[in-house]
Amino acid sequence: MVPISAQSAQPAVLVEELVAGYGGTPALTGLDFVAAPGERVALLGPNGGGKTTLIRTLQGDLTPISGTFTLRGIVGHVPQKSSGRNDWPVTALDVAICGTLDALPWWRVPGKAQRRAAREALEAVGLGERSSTPYGELSGGQQRRTQVAAALAGGASVLLLDEPFAGLDAVAADRLEKLLATLADSGTTLLIATHDLDQARSWEKVLCLNGEQLAFGPPEAVLTRQTLEATFGSDLLEIPGGGFMAPPHHHHDH
């Protein structure tokens, strides 16, 4: 990863000939794509198709087997919904403050500037009035927006979101969708792992993955029957009246 200052004339994300995997074993090959500032890119694929592998590589958890990638600006990560405990004694503000820690020396504790950034980020995601609410008492959608706030508090201009809509009801999903649209309008680049074809059709670019990069580009060019069959295989479902939908998603990806 080569983080440099974001410049609108340059891509926010540049991936070239990238091969990613675990322990030297490729799980995802042939990655070549570019995302501009303010673009929403759907990482579309089946369970186990490589969406999480790509996100973990871009955020620095996995070392590429070969190839290169460049991320311009500060990178934030919104993980998959945790199945762990929600009763830790932390508030929404505490979680948002955590997003500022990477920019601090190890020996410094968050101060007024970090608390201010966290409060502003919570306001930006519509949770300013819930800053003192215990995190475990927030709804699933509010927890997801709190995670986005943590990334924003850290100054992120590139957001990697791993199935952010998983487990959300329609109201929470709509609110998160509107938040992501607002962030994109402000110049934030969003790479969003999803299996939802309707979402993918509404965003600027789609990257189809199933162990390899199958297609990349605007949704009207990428989401053809041929590409979707290669992406989802025999699991692709045809719906009455024309069109297709991905199979039901089993949450954890590789």
Image (cartoon, rainbow, N blue to C red):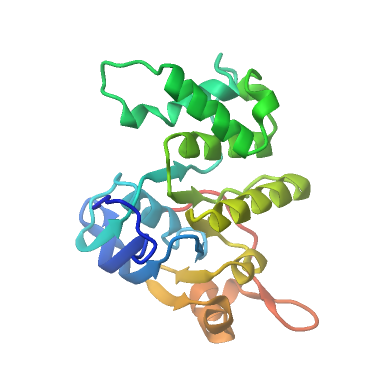
In-front residue for pair 57/219: 219
Kindly identify the residue that appears in the image at 50 percent across and 63 percent down. 39
In-front residue for pair 31/98: 98
Kindly identify the residue that appears in the image at 33 percent across and 65 percent down. 10
Image height of 96 relative to 175, above or below: above
Q: Position of residue 235 (x, y in %)?
A: 60, 71
Q: Position of residue 190 (x, y in %)?
A: 49, 56
Residue 96 shows in the view = no
Count how many numbered circles sit on residues in the image. 0
Q: Position of residue 90 (x, y in %)?
A: 55, 17
Q: Position of residue 239 (x, y in %)?
A: 75, 77
Image height of 8 relative to 80, above or below: below
Left or right, 24 with reference to 42: left
Image height of 65 relative to 109, above or below: below
**Residue 185 falls in which quadrant of the image?**
bottom right
Image height of 92 relative to 164, above or below: above
Kindly identify the residue that appears in the image at 54 percent across and 69 percent down. 204
Kindly identify the residue that appears in the image at 36 percent across and 61 percent down. 13
**Residue 54 falls in which quadrant of the image?**
bottom left
Residue 119 shows in the view = yes
Left or right, 4 with reference to 176: left
**Residue 121 falls in which quadrant of the image?**
top right
